[in-house]
Image (cartoon, rainbow, N blue to C red):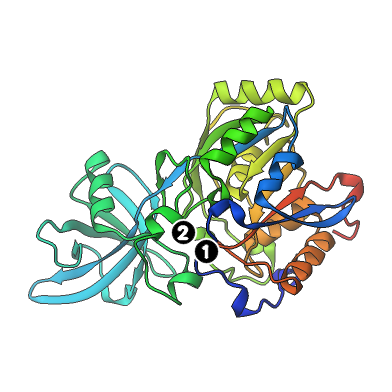
Amino acid sequence: MRVSDFDFDLPEKLIALHPVEPRDSARLLVVDPKVGLADRHIPDLLWLLKPGDVLVVNDTRVLPAELRGTRVRGENRANVSFNLHKRVDAHTWRAFARPAKKLALLDRLELGNGQADALVATVAGRGDTGEVTLEFDLGGAQLDEAIKSHGAMPLPPYIGAKRDVEERDLVDYQTVYAAEDGAVAAPTAGLHFTEKLLQQLTDKGVTIERVTLHVGAGTFLPMKVDDTDDHVMHAEWGEIDQATVERIRVKQALGGRVIAVGTTSLRLLETASRKTGTLQPFMGDTDIFITPGFRFATVDALMTNFHLPKSTLFMLVSAFAGMDMMKRAYAHAIEDGYRFYSYGDSSLLLRARPEEDEEEL
């Protein structure tokens, strides 16, 4: 398919630079391919979801993975910054560098803006589009703690270009159920939940299940091809364990729906379902690329924020609820002043069944 098929015009004023307060007061656009569109709010999930449904959340924790510091080359020094985006091993991360042209293999880096206990690394590799491989002197849990100490929250570029990172982002850009360190971008649909709302859903009979997918900064990379067949998807590490799979299967057998909170949860669930057509335990990297025509095996509904034009995520939601339906939904959201992107409002999409899909796709 042509990437241009997924383009739309978005007024800049609709890009949210901060979340609403409290976080569960955001708007929620319900998109049902059979019924149409309905304007709701996040607390309406209490009656939109039913006893027996399974809400699957991504419990990855965002590391403050924006690092600034100095390249040291003999007596020469230069200011550089990095956004970590994928862990390679205990000592090594891939990162996007700015400016990448100042870096060469084996350059030494002192990260932490001149702090006495600078985080030291070596440039161990260079790739395309400003990507580098950083090998840190520290490793494992020590490295994680040092990154937390020296780094800043890696806000999406469409926010970071308009304002500086603020102290409140340490809380705002983290879900209330975040547990597993490793993400460098938030699973933003989950930012709308409070502990109170989760408890209310549980009291109603909705099961909350946790999976882990460490979101990478590649989720923000623009597509640089004209045809979706030519796009290479970034890989992200995820895990669904046996016990979680078994609990979800039991609820499915009793008629419960699987509702993925965020495209990251959906991508992991559908990755774990691809080989057999039913959900299986999974641990490893996934680079699944979902476009219209994809056949979903596990997820019945998707809660997700509003995405960038021509992005892989807008392609995913178009595959899930139908391309024509999502174009209608986004046109309505823009007309009605919904707030877009990571700190914006949300939507609840019901899956288009094969007989509802656009035949021309």
Q: What amino acid does circle 1 point to?
A: Phe
Locate the N terminus and report the quarter of the image it occupies.
bottom right
Q: CA distance from mark 1 to mark 2?
A: 6 Å
Q: Residues within 10 Å of mark 2 (few under 14, many from 20)?
A: many
Foreground residue, 125 or 309? 309
The residue lying at 51 percent from left, 50 percent from top is: 235
How many other residues sit within 10 Å of disc 1, few (<14), some (14-19) or many (≥20)? some
Residue 359 vs residue 27, the one in the foreground: 27
- Residue 320 vertical placement versus 7 (above, below): above
Tell me the amino acid under the disc marked 2.
Answer: Ala
Q: Is residue 155 visible?
A: yes
Picture residue at 77% right of the left edge, 44% below the top? 295
The residue at which mark 2 appears reads as: 217
Q: Taking 199 as reference, is 322 left or right? A: right
| 240 versus 108 height, above or below | above
| Residue 205 versus residue 269 in the image, above or below | above
The residue lying at 73 percent from left, 29 percent from top is 51
The residue sitting at 57% across, 56% down in the picture is 233
- Look at the numbered disc 1 and give the secondary structure of its residue: helix
Q: Which mark is residue 220?
A: 1
Could one spot residue 279 in this view of the protein?
no
Q: Quadrant of the C terminus?
A: bottom right
Front-lying residue, 169 or 103: 169
Residue 332 rendering spot, x and y as whole percentages: 78, 68
In this picture, is 271 found above or below 28? Answer: above
Residue 303: where, in percent of width, then height?
Answer: 67, 48
x and y, in percent, of residue 321 in the image: 79, 52
Quadrant location of residue 164? bottom left
Residue 213: give x, y in percent of width and height.
51, 42
1 and 2 marks in contact (CB < 8 Å): yes
